[in-house]
Image (cartoon, rainbow, N blue to C red):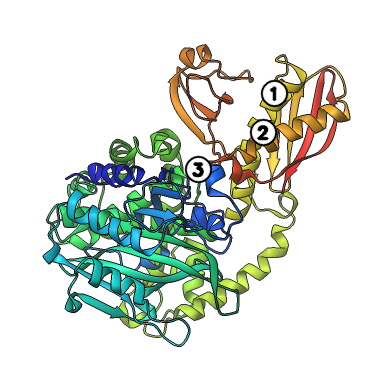
Amino acid sequence: MTSEQIREKFLEFFEKKGHKIVPSSSLIPDDPSVLLTTAGMQQFKRYYTAELDATADFGSQRTVSAQKCFRTSDIEETGDKTHLTFFEMLGNFSFGPVGSDNPEDFKTSGYFKRSSIFWSYEFITEILGIGVDRITVSVFKGDDATPFDEESYNIWHKELGIPKDKIILGSRVDNFWGPTGDEGPCGPCTEIYVDGVEIWNNVFNEYYKEKNGGFVKTENPGVDTGMGLERLTAMMQGVDDVFGTDIFQPLVAKVRESVSSEHDRVVRILADHLRASIFLIGDGIRPSNKEAGYILRRLLRRIMAYQIKYDIHADLFPESVEIIKNKFGKTYPELNETKKILEVLEDEKQKFQEAVGRGMKEIEKFKEIGGKEAFYLYETFGLPFELIKELAPKEAIENLYKEDFDKEFEKHQEISRSGAEKKFGGHGLLLDTGELKAGSEEEMKKVIRFHTATHLLQWALREVLGKDVRQMGSDINPERMRFDFSFSRKMTSEEIKKAEDLVNEKIKENLPVHFKEMLKNEAEKIGALSFFKAKYPETVKVYFIGPISPMGFLSAEFCGGPHVNWTSEIGKFKITKEEASSAGIRRIRATVL
């Protein structure tokens, strides 16, 4: 069974159980407590807390997804047969309130432990065809903070017949999950093992962890499950190495053309980092010296350093981008933007290739490298701490500790912070497309929300003022958006209010935001809007707001992105000012809350 078939069967199985298939959210999370998206439940966090209504947004209290995830904690572990930085998480979710916990009830209400466990068992044994004798499970044994999960134990043993000797009683470390960040939904979990390998974790969010506080029982318990596609695929394909699955084989084969056979660990690291970097770039992350951009830069520097260390002359970037597009582009369309992704890779290579080479030579000059010396190598030559540890002679780094390097890094940040305030109103630029400007990952999230809001605003203005309205330009930064449009007079207060209300209505409807690559003439035929004088190529990217159906769509524009995935991610839209820009051109200034 291929990885594509496993993904498809999982989504279809839970769709038949009343779940709404929801696309993967971006690797850039809307949760400020985490750096990158690390789990499938993150995009649903506000549904567990009842801040958002899943029935209103999805038509069901049940959702299912294949989610792109990245875990920075596994960067150093990469190179063995199981650890990955980027992976796909298959998950099914229930947000409560629990309407029924009968696994035969395929309605759209919330469910809890019984249905979750029964469906997991059904999917593994009937859909995947795995024998019951190969299955072991674990449940939370309880501690001083939260009690033994007796309900899950009884479902496995008394209802499904799993023998007691195949039910492990696990501690909080192993069988209590969450929250993501400092606070949030969390609870006991039951893990499912096949042949001793964990493949699926069912988390029962019956608690809320308060910030700097304890665990409080929630009124609306939820279900959050996660199953790594790569590990599951390895098990289904009978290999003990995730890099031996169809997921990685084309990329691994390409890397092996340039790396000698005795360096299996290097091959795995390169394959992992190449795939992870391409996915990060596809979601709009750009190399930088902070936050998610630093993670991307760290991966790319490591790739290039290995190329130097192992004398790899092949240009891995172009062919890797094409391999990843061919393998994943149908599921994740942002990976079809190969030209843009490759431009980022080549730009980073140009910036750092020579610097890394010089830095490696510089290392040889030091008899001893401590925190200050390591930071000097990082700041001057772009060598991250981990790479210095790997490339420097062992005798030179006996007294090199991460905490010392971090102290030097923090000092540097304090010194540079005041200087950064002079740039771009306090924001050193990480993203600058001309229209969109951001100085950090958090700012990038804000400007992406603004960007999608401009599409909604354009639609609203044409509804209120007429179809002659044409966008004449825009400028977006983390504090506000500016939108220029053709119109001959000042808008009335009623017109401004109506346009603002229309935008907020569509935000509340939580419409999907998605794109298609189309021939330019086809895009024009369906009514996609383009308002600039730039000459478009024959194939263009069209962003749609609203589902494409026989009834049409809300908005379609020629646009390169990036955008939110759902309009509800924008937040509340507020027009702050309408004014003249020039003759026949009006200007709206707005913000999102």
SS of the residue at dot 3? helix
Decide: is 358 above or below 531. Answer: below
Can you see residue 479? Answer: yes
SS of the residue at dot 1? strand
Disc number for residue 471: 1
Report x, y in % for residue 575: 79, 38
Report x, y in % for residue 474: 70, 32
Apparent side of residue 231 relative to residue 435 in the rendered image (left or right): left
Decide: is 170 above or below 275. Answer: below
Q: Residues within 10 Å of mark 1 (few under 14, many from 20)?
A: many
Q: Tell me the residue at 57%/50% (across/down).
A: 53
Q: Nearer the viewer, mark 2 or mark 3?
A: 3
SS of the residue at dot 2? helix
Apparent side of residue 393 relative to residue 342 in the rendered image (left or right): left
Q: Which residue is mark 2?
A: 454
Picture quarter with the N terminus: top left
Q: Which residue is mark 3?
A: 58
Q: How far apart are labels 1 and 3 at the CA level?
A: 32 Å
> Along the line of sight, which residue is nearer the eye, 523 or 262?
523
Q: Is there CB contact under 8 Å for labels 1 and 3?
A: no
Q: Tell me the residue at 30%/74% (across/down).
A: 153
- Give the residue type at disc 3: Phe
Q: Residues within 10 Å of mark 3 (few under 14, many from 20)?
A: some
- Give the residue type at disc 2: Thr
Report x, y in % for residue 400: 42, 81
Disc number for residue 432: none
